[in-house]
């Protein structure tokens, strides 16, 4: 390098230094923000790793079969007692006998039968929902 190029390099350095001094506060703030962002990013990365480990542990726990004593399952009486699956038929038969004997009037017996059938339909739909959510 000759002296003319040295002079130009020194002048360019002095111009860059003057610019940095004029805007030095802004550059420093930007650098501090960058360091803060890097620190927060590292912190969030650590939290993300921890959450991923917890998520994996919870998924592993949820995939295990539920023990009979530990977990409560939603079930209907029809699912619990095999002989009780058609419980509504016996109640309807009793209501029909009471209506034929004159203990219950026909409209009252029909309303009671409608109520029994509604309960039976709800019980059956609940049993189907329980079987779908708890496959054995």
Image (tube, rainbow, N blue to C red):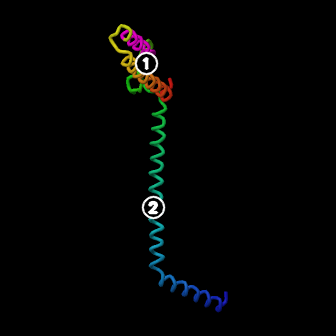
Disc 2, SS: helix
Identify the residue at horizontal 48%, vertical 62% (top origin): 38
- Going from N to C along the chain, the mark reached first, 1 or 2, is 2
Task: Examine the image and state in which quarter residue 84 appears.
Answer: top left
Residue 10: percent from left, percent from top: 58, 88
The relative height of residue 109 versus residue 45 in the rendered view (above or below) is: above
Label count reads 2
Question: Residue 90 magenta-drawn?
Answer: yes
- Name the residue nearer the viewer: 136 or 106: 106
Q: Nearer the viewer, residue 66 or 121?
A: 121
- Would you place residue 59 above or below residue 34 in this image? above
Identify the element where label 1 is drawn: helix
State which mark lies toward you, 1 or 2: 1
Q: Which residue is mark 2?
A: 39
Above or below, 3 against 69 in this view is below
Q: Which residue is mark 1?
A: 78
Residue at the spot x=50%, y=82% of the render?
20
Q: What residue appears at the point 46 percent right and 55 percent down from the top-left corner?
A: 44
> Residue 50, how many percent across, how many down?
45, 47
Callouts 1 and 2 close, C-beta under 8 Å: no
Question: How far apart in space, not on screen, are marks 1 and 2 (Cα)?
Answer: 59 Å
Q: Which residues lie in the magenta part?
A: 84-98
Q: Is residue 34 left or right of residue 7?
A: left
In the image, taking residue 8 as reference, residue 31 lies left or right, namely left
């Amino acid at each position: 390098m000759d002296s003319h190029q040295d002079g130009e390099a020194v002048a360019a350095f002095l111009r860059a230094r003057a610019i940095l001094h004029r805007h030095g506060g802004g550059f420093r703030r930007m650098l501090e923000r960058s360091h803060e962002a890097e620190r927060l990013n590292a912190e969030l990365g650590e939290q993300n790793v921890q959450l991923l480990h917890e998520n994996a542990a919870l998924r592993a726990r949820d995939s295990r079969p539920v023990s009979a004593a530990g977990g409560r399952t939603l079930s209907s009486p029809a699912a619990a007692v095999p002989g009780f699956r058609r419980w509504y038929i016996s109640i309807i038969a009793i209501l029909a006998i009471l209506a034929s004997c004159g203990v219950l009037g026909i409209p009252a017996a029909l309303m009671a039968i409608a109520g029994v059938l509604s309960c039976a339909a709800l019980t059956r739909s609940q049993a189907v929902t329980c079987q779908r959510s708890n496959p054995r």
